[in-house]
Amino acid sequence: MLYASARDWRRTAHKRVLFFGMSGLGKTHVSNMLREAGGWFHYSIDYRIGTRYMGEYIADNAKAEAMKVPFLRELLLSDSIYIGSNLSFDNLTPVSAYLGRPGDPSRGGLAIGDYRRRQEQFRHAEIYALLDTDYFIDRAERLYGYPHFVCDTGGSICEWVEAENPDDPVLSELARRTLMIWIKGDEAHTAELIRRFDKAPKPMSYQPEFLTRVWNEYLRENKCEEDEVDPDAFVRWTYAKALAHRQPRYEAMARNWGVTVTADQVAAIRDEGDFDDLVAEALERRAHP
């Protein structure tokens, strides 16, 4: 553990934390609050993925769609227009749009082979972005003079690591430089996340073994072929299963590599002082369970 006790946390001149947990429970909210307080560098894993590791995939996909339109094709081939993604901390839609959803192409679905390829691209991109944390910690202090650092991870971090392995290369590197903090939701939060997702389903990234299992189950239960799958229906059907799949993986990450706070506690944070207190209490609980 980077900070062995609440006392170490309160006395350090360099606070470095990493948030993990399901999307929608407050990771980006508290990261933005700390950045706005001053003194904190905010490193967004999803933003890094979209700009550094998947930027060309995203742009090329948009260009491929534009090439299907004769008017735009002519302008692209003559270098008369430029197509790129307008990615920001608050707008990560280009990444989600590229990931897409599998199923019927007439309803916006991807062939499952293409979908798996994009999922694998995202897996590599997220691992690389996570391992860049060390570089950005040093860069934030050396270049910009920030004493504190917060890493805001995506919900899929748990899919690519083995939390029970003390030599896991990603977790070992992250724990060496940051205090890993799980933002844990309860049953009410889970129900609300499912309700929100059902209203506006969004693409997700899945562990390959999990994707294979749920894809085959969906085809079997709905007695349909791959190109007959309703893309939105599939991701809605899969979402609750993905939450259940990820929960024990998050728990193992927190148990072996970090500390736990609740989504309600995070929602109650009003300033940097509240955050310092919350982390100190989490470290105290870990030291004296």
Image (cartoon, grey):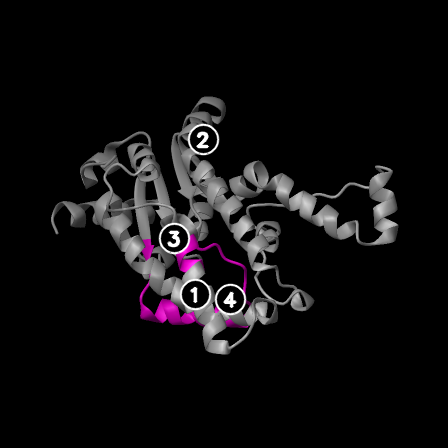
Name the amino acid type tagged 4.
Answer: Val
Per the image, label 1 sits on a secondary structure element best described as helix
Q: Pointer 2: residues within 10 angstroms few (<14), some, or many (20+)?
A: some
Question: How far is disc 4 from disc 2 in space, using C-alphas?
Answer: 33 Å
Q: Considering only order in the chain, which callout, 2 or 4, is on the residue closer to the N terminus?
A: 2
**Residue 284 in picture, x, y percent from top left:** 17, 46
Which numbered circle lies on residue 270? 3
- Disc 4 versus disc 2: nearer the observer: 4
Q: Nearer the viewer, residue 10 or 209?
A: 209
Question: How far is disc 3 from disc 4 in space, using C-alphas?
Answer: 35 Å
How many marks are shown on the rendered structure?
Answer: 4
Question: How far is disc 2 from disc 3 in space, using C-alphas?
Answer: 26 Å
Q: Pointer 3: residues within 10 angstroms few (<14), some, or many (20+)?
A: few
Question: How far is disc 1 from disc 4 in space, using C-alphas?
Answer: 10 Å
Which residue does the numbered mark 4 point to in the structure image?
A: 235
> Is 104 placed above or below 60 here?
below
Left or right: residue 11 versus residue 86 is left
Which numbered circle lies on residue 136? 2
Name the amino acid type tagged 3.
Answer: Arg
Q: In which quadrant of the rendered image does the N terminus lie?
A: top left
Per the image, label 2 sits on a secondary structure element best described as helix
Q: Pointer 1: residues within 10 angstroms few (<14), some, or many (20+)?
A: some
Q: Considering only order in the chain, which callout, 4 or 3, is on the residue closer to the N terminus?
A: 4
Which residue sits at x=31%, y=53%? 250
Which residue does the numbered mark 1 point to in the structure image?
A: 214
Residue span colored magenta: 183-211
Q: Residue furthest top?
A: 142
- Disc 3 versus disc 4: nearer the observer: 4
- Disc 2 versus disc 3: nearer the observer: 2
Name the amino acid type tagged 2.
Answer: Phe
Residue 24 is at least partly visible in this image: no
